[in-house]
Image (tube, helix red, strand yellow):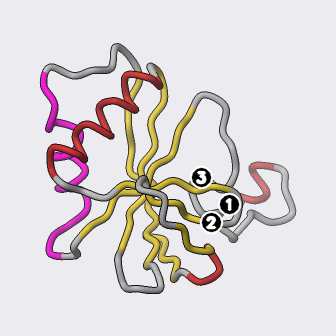
Amino acid sequence: MTKDLAEILGVSSLPTVREIPGTIEVDGREFWYVGCDGKGAFNKLFSKLLSAISPPLHRSGGAITGGCSLTLPDGRVFHSLSYRGDLAGWKKQVTQGAQKLNLELAQIKADKIELIHGETFLLSECEVDFY
């Protein structure tokens, strides 16, 4: 007899709603959104961003893509990433790498996405895509 995952985990159903990365605080993890021109895969841009500054500025931890993009009302697209470990070092790695590559950065602040230069948009006005 086979058991489904919900039965194995002892729950009646598994959650199907995904949260926008950064809307829920996770202890020891920071979230950023990186502007992408849509001309290539975000995974390639992610790798390029994290290797733009050498030697690395972080001493520990790691970074991952968040599997989420936000399309702003003006059409700009931002993809999520997060990191853990040496938060100060990773923050410098991401922000300095973005500056070197001339990429826009943003973070979630309550119900808004706030670009690093101060421009804000309500999340409810953005198109959300999970991948």
Q: Is residue 87 something that shows in the picture?
A: yes
Pick the quarter of the image with the N terminus.
bottom right
Residue type for callout 3: Gly
Which mark's residue is nearer the viewer, 3 or 1? 3
Point out residue 130 in the picture as x, y percentages from the top left corner: 49, 71
Q: Which residue is mark 2?
A: 112
Q: Secondary structure at mark 3?
A: loop
Q: Which residue is mark 1?
A: 2
State whether residue 71 is above or below residue 31.
below
Q: Is residue 1 something that shows in the picture?
A: no
Point out residue 43 in the picture as x, y percentages from the top left corner: 24, 56
Point out residue 5 in the picture as x, y percentages from the top left corner: 69, 58
All told, the count of numbered labels is: 3
Of 7 and 85, which appears nearest the observer? Answer: 85
Residue type for callout 2: Lys
Q: Which residue is mark 3?
A: 22
Q: Is residue 99 magenta?
A: no
State whether residue 10 is above or below residue 68.
above
